[in-house]
Image (tube, rainbow, N blue to C red):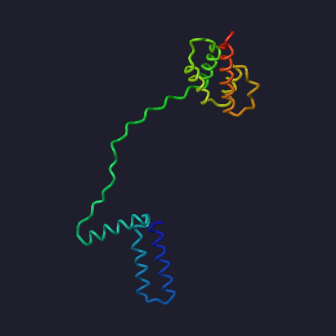
Amino acid sequence: MNVAAVQQHFRDLARLVEQAGAAQKVVSGLAAIAVGLEPFGGYSVEQFAEFLRRAEEYHRTGVLPVVLTKTKAAPKPPKAPKPPKPVAADVIRRVTELYHNILNPNLTTEAIDGELNLLDGLKKTDLQAVAETVGIGEKVKKFKLADMAIAIRKAILDRRGMFHRPGY
């Protein structure tokens, strides 16, 4: 609630007591309060109460009380900028290379995961292009975005697993 609402209540109260037959002095006093609140219409009731407390202290002591504001802590260092998102064509190329090089025994799980995480930033049409590259294009055409990325991951990891089983 703000002071403008309180101001309206005083206007309404002035009209009510006037219609009830109150003395003009009472009516004009209530109207004067409403007019006096005009400059404070945007204040919250709490802000206005603090203003009144400070005004009373100034009136009583002649000293304007200082309002202490919260000091900010030392400024935080700026956040490191996020790396730019890779371009879809670049992601498609990298995932395609991963698919073709998945049999490389020197390829680490972390490297594979890093490349596959790039799928998360692609749009459905781009994921469809990757799906076609890994041979599951028709299978995932009607999949939702998240399911399509999961299916591509599975296809690539299954290809690696197929050749890393004992006996091959």
Residue 56, x across and y down, in percent: 30, 71
The residue depicted at 48 percent of the width and 70 percent of the height is 5
User: What residue occupies the far right of the structure in this picture?
Assistant: 138
Q: Is residue 99 left or right of residue 45?
A: right
Q: Nearer the viewer, residue 135 or 128?
A: 135
Residue 21, x across and y down, in percent: 49, 90
Q: Quadrant of the C terminus?
A: top right
Number of numbered discs overlaid on the protein picture: 0
Q: Nearer the viewer, residue 167 or 123?
A: 167
The vertical placement of 27 against 120, above or below, is: below
The vertical placement of 115 against 24, above or below, is: above
User: What residue occupies the far left of the structure in this picture?
Assistant: 62
The residue depicted at 34 percent of the width and 47 percent of the height is 72
Residue 47, x across and y down, in percent: 39, 64
Residue 98 falls in which quadrant of the image?
top right
The residue depicted at 70 percent of the width and 34 percent of the height is 144
Q: Nearer the viewer, residue 155 or 129?
A: 155
Residue 157, x across and y down, in percent: 65, 20
